[in-house]
Image: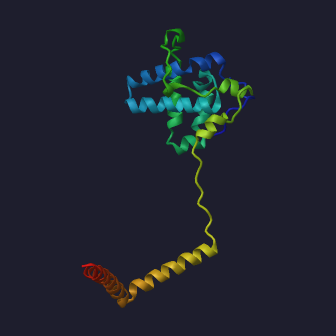
Amino acid sequence: MVPATAGDGDLPRATAEDERHLPKILRAFQRFLALSKSESTARQYMANIKKLYNQDGLSPESIASDKYHARILNSPENKRCNNQLASAVKNFANWWSQRPDLSKLEETNDKLYQVKPRVAELAGTIPEQLPPSDVAKRKRPQTPEPVTAKAKAAEATAAAESMRRASTPSAGRDAAEANKRTRTGDVQGTNGSTAGAA
């Protein structure tokens, strides 16, 4: 989907006040949907509106507009997700047309409803990169060390030697006899030294 650009005068971007109200708007929207839809559908539609805001940074009025609905409806991303984005926008537009009194909506700090700070980001005051502390917390993918030809040859030689020893029938018997002789000799040597001491 092509994000809305700053030149989209017909689809105004969110203001700082819009962004501050968005978490409670999203929660109220989800609760409204849960009255007529399953909880999972209500949550998914809310998540799609949040996703679109995080992507485009448009005001709730813009998201609820017919023009935005048409743009989303024809987007490849909407087609990939079986029209769920356009359905979410349509439901949001229906709810938004009732013009909820934002001052009466309950505030929320629940992370589920929090949005990216798009107003400041689009104004160029927030860097796109994560702070160094957040970058350090991310796991870095481990890349395997390259295997050299010399290491491969040594591994192949060791494997061949191991197989050769295991496949020789007398190898196991010879080792067992040598082990037996060693134990017998130890016992005889101990008996001999005991006898000599007596």
Q: Residue at x 45, y 24 (%)?
A: 30
Quadrant of the image for the C terminus?
Answer: bottom left
Q: Nearer the viewer, residue 57 or 89?
A: 57
Q: Is residue 89 left or right of residue 127?
A: left
Q: Residue 156 at what x, y percent from top left?
A: 53, 78
Report x, y in % for residue 18: 61, 18
Picture quadrant where residue 89 is located: top right
Vertical placement of 168 versus 112: above or below?
below
* Left or right of 36 in this view: 58: right
The location of residue 170, given as percent across then percent down, is 36, 90
Above or below, 176 against 57 in this view is below
At 55% from the left and 40% from the top, the residue drawn is: 78
> 161 and 49: which one is in front?
161
* Picture colour scheme: rainbow
Q: What's the residue at 52%, 33% (across, down)?
A: 48
**Rendering coords of residue 13 (x, y %):** 67, 24
Depth check: 141 or 37 in front? Answer: 141
Quadrant of the image containing the N terminus: top right
Residue shown at 51% from the left, 78% from the top: 158
